[in-house]
C-alpha cells in the first residue's frame, strides 16, 4: 500500500540529546513537510522540501534540522537547541504543483523529553 | 498573528444532530480551504475542501459553507454519528503555494450515542 511511514511512533529523550525522526513515502510525491502538533495550537510547519537536496524553513524551524537526499525520505532531527521539544510530530507529502494541494500525513511520532 | 482562527475548541453533539465548526481567516489572498479529520493517534486526513468561487460544497453528510465577504468558512456535519468523533482542523492556503498551509487550532468533536 502506498503511504507515509513515520518511525519511531514513540520516543523518549533526555535533555541535551539530539534525536532523529524518520519519514519515508512511497507515493512518488515531490513535496514533503514536517509539522509539529501541540494541544490547542493546531499544526505548525517546521520545514518543507519541494525537491531533492532542497528544503526551506517553516514557521518554527529553530532547533530543528532536516535533509532530503532521496525523494522518498525526509528525516527530521530535533536538536538540543530546541527548548520545548515534547510534542507530536507529523510528516506529510503532496504532489507539487497540482490544483488539489492535498496533504497526505503519516501516523506521527510522539517525542517526550524526560 | 494567527492566520486562521477556529472555534469552538471542543464540541459535544448528540447522535443525529448537526455539528458546526467555524473558521475565520485574515489573508484575502487565500484561495484554497480544506478541512482535515484526525482520529486519536493518527495523522490528519483530508475530509473536504472548497475554493472561494463557490459558496457551498457538499460531500455526503459533510458541507462547507463559505462567506468570502466575511472571510469565514464553516464545516457542517449532518446526522452526526459516533464514528465522526475526531479532531477537525480547518486550513487555508494559496493555490500556487501549497507549501504554506495555515491550520486552525482544531476542534475536538464528541458525538454521544
Image: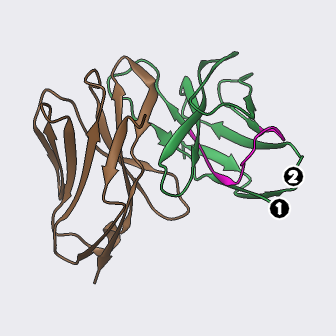
Q: Earlier in the sequence, mark 1 or mark 2?
A: 2
Q: Which residue is mark 1?
A: A114
Say left or right for A76 vs A4.
right
Q: Quadrant of residue B103?
A: top left
Q: Quadrant of residue B11?
A: bottom left
- On screen, B19 above or below A73? below
Instruction: Chain letter for green, please.
Output: A
- On screen, A45 above or below B9? above
As rendered, which of B112 and B107 lies closer to the eye?
B107
Q: Quadrant of residue B28?
A: top left
Q: Position of residue B92 (x, y in %)?
A: 34, 34
Crowd band around label 1 with a 10 angstrom C-alpha radius: few (<14), some (14–19), many (20+): few
Q: Position of residue B106 (x, y in %)?
A: 40, 54
* Letter of the chain that mark 1 sits on in the rendering: A
User: Is B12 one of the magenta-colored residues?
Assistant: no
- On screen, A49 above or below B10? above
Image point (50%, 44%), residue name: A43
Instruction: Chain letter for brown, please.
Output: B
As rendered, which of B25 and A54 lies closer to the eye?
B25
Q: Which residue is mark 2?
A: A15
User: Is A86 one of the magenta-colored residues?
Assistant: yes
Q: Position of residue B110 (x, y in %)?
A: 34, 73
As rendered, which of A48 and A100 lies closer to the eye?
A48
Crowd band around label 2 with a 10 angstrom C-alpha radius: few (<14), some (14–19), many (20+): some
Range covered by the magenta-colored residues? A78-91
Image point (24%, 51%), residue name: B22
Real-space CA distance between mark 1 and mark 2, rounded to the nearest whole angstrom:
7 Å
* Letter of the chain that mark 2 sits on in the rendering: A
Amino acid at each position: 500500500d502506498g503511504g507515509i511511514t513515520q518511525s519511531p511512533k514513540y520516543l523518549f529523550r533526555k535533555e541535551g540529546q539530539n534525536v532523529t525522526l524518520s519519514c519515508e513515502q512511497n507515493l512518488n510525491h515531490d513535496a514533503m513537510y514536517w509539522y509539529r502538533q501541540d494541544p490547542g495550537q493546531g499544526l505548525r510547519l517546521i520545514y518543507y522540501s519541494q525537491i531533492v537536496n532542497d528544503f526551506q524553513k517553516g514557521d518554527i524551524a529553530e532547533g530543528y534540522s532536516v535533509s532530503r537526499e532521496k525523494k522518498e525520505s525526509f528525516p527530521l532531527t530535533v536538536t538540543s537547541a530546541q527548548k520545548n521539544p515534547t510534542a507530536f510530530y507529523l510528516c506529510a507529502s503532496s504532489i507539487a504543483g497540482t490544483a488539489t494541494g492535498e496533504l497526505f500525513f503519516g501516523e506521527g511520532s510522539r517525542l517526550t523529553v524526560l | 498573528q494567527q492566520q486562521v482562527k477556529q472555534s469552538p475548541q471542543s464540541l459535544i453533539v448528540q447522535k443525529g444532530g448537526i455539528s458546526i465548526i467555524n473558521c475565520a481567516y485574515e489573508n484575502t489572498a487565500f484561495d484554497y480551504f480544506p478541512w482535515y479529520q484526525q482520529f486519536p493517534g493518527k495523522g490528519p486526513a483530508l475530509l473536504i475542501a472548497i475554493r472561494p468561487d463557490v459558496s457551498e460544497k457538499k460531500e455526503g453528510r459533510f458541507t462547507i459553507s463559505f462567506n468570502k465577504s466575511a472571510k469565514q468558512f464553516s464545516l457542517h456535519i449532518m446526522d452526526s454519528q459516533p464514528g465522526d468523533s475526531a479532531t477537525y482542523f480547518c486550513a487555508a492556503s494559496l493555490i500556487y503555494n501549497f507549501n504554506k498551509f495555515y491550520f486552525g487550532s482544531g476542534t475536538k468533536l464528541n458525538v454521544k450515542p
